[in-house]
Image: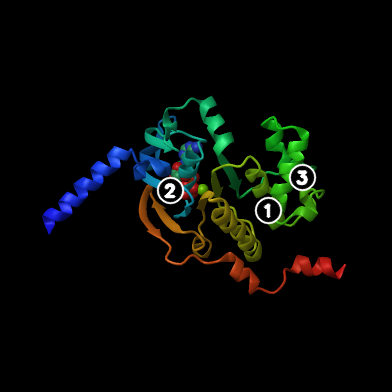
Amino acid sequence: MAEATQQERRRTEQHDSGLGLVSPDQSDVIRLEQVHRIYRSGDVEVHALRGVSLAIGRGEFVAIMGPSGSGKTTLMNMIGCLDRPTRGHYFLEGMDVSQFSGNELADVRNRKIGFVFQAMNLLPRTSSLENVELPLLYAGASPREQLRRAREALASVGLSDKERSVPSQLSGGQQQRVAIARALVNRPSIFIADEPTGNLDSRSSLEVMEIFQRLNREQKLTLVLVTHEADIASHATRIVTVRDGRIRQDAPVASPRSARETLDQMPPASDEAAEEAL
Ligand SMILES: Nc1ncnc2c1ncn2[C@@H]1O[C@H](COP(=O)(O)OP(=O)(O)O)[C@@H](O)[C@H]1O
Ligand SMILES: [Mg+2]
């Protein structure tokens, strides 16, 4: 019995190597190996990440939780190629980006990663459409292509009717959806969101989660989201808990909550009701 199993395993191994199949490691879109990050200022050292190893496959939706100061933002900066490990390696789609120069990192960031932060950083006196067009302008797309793709991105976050609005004419939730459209427009393969619902009411937070779940499902977008709210994290497919610069827990979510279902059960939004009353 045991022998048969062993033979079976050998055969499988030979089979795999013979066909040159991709090993599970290579299919990870994100892989951190023993990553350390030490901040130094003068004589003071802060050991923000203390040997983090983490592998995330394509199409996963991972929530990162942990108390303030535990290293979540440092970890996100690493995954988003905004920073490099002091020690250890980071493989992004198999490339060892921990060895990349600043310019190479910027290039990877622009091509592969979409960022959504708590502060939306939209240009104030600029329409939604122009805010979303901006990354395409930098990427050198033609004006026609900019318009087409910006419109498409705004439609995918449900804001086609707000193309001409400037940020001050939008609610916080709508502004965050413009920021999501802006992050989407270069068609990144990974979305990094650090406390994207931190400033939003519960309905707007759910609308953001609904968009993330849809992008994850329909476009197989890989999502990594930092939140300190357990009910937000429960929309992800996996929750990683960080404490003192280390991963303390890493577990799949048995049945992730559906933001769509929760929204459908809520009464109509007050701003929608107000608009209808006009
Ligand atoms: N640029 C920096 N310089 C020095 N220390 C920093 C810097 N950024 C973060 N830290 C420190 O690193 C630790 C982790 O911070 P951070 O990653 O921001 O945690 P979190 O996002 O979980 O609140 C904290 O002790 C913080 O004070
Ligand atoms: Mg943080």
> Who is closer to the viewer here, 83 or 266?
266
> Who is closer to the viewer here, 34 or 38?
34
* Rendered residue at 58%/43% (across/down): 114
Q: Mark 3 or 2 closer to N-term?
A: 2
Name the disc covering residue 156, or none.
1
Q: Amino acid at mark 1?
A: Ser
Label 3 CB-ligand 2 distance < 8 A: no
The Cα–Cα distance between marks 3 and 2, rounded to whole angstroms, is 32 Å
Q: Secondary structure at mark 3?
A: helix
Assess disc 3: are there few (<14), some (14-19) or many (≥20) residues with their C-alpha within 10 Å of its C-alpha. Answer: many
Name the disc covering residue 57, or none.
2
Q: Mark 3 or 1 closer to N-term?
A: 3
Q: Amino acid at mark 2?
A: Gly
Query: Which quadrant, please, contains the C terminus?
Result: bottom right
Does residue 112 appear left or right of residue 134 in this picture?
A: left
Which residue is most to the right?
A: 278
Assess disc 2: are there few (<14), some (14-19) or many (≥20) residues with their C-alpha within 10 Å of its C-alpha. Answer: some
- Marks 1/2 in contact by CB < 8 Å: the verdict is no
Q: Amino acid at mark 3?
A: Leu
The residue to which callout 3 is attached is: 129
Residue 204 in the image, given as x and y percentages of width and height? 66, 61
Residue 224 in the image, given as x and y percentages of width and height? 50, 50
Residue 68 in the image, given as x and y percentages of width and height? 47, 52
* Rendered residue at 81%/50% (across/down): 165
Query: Which quadrant, please, contains the N terminus?
Result: bottom left
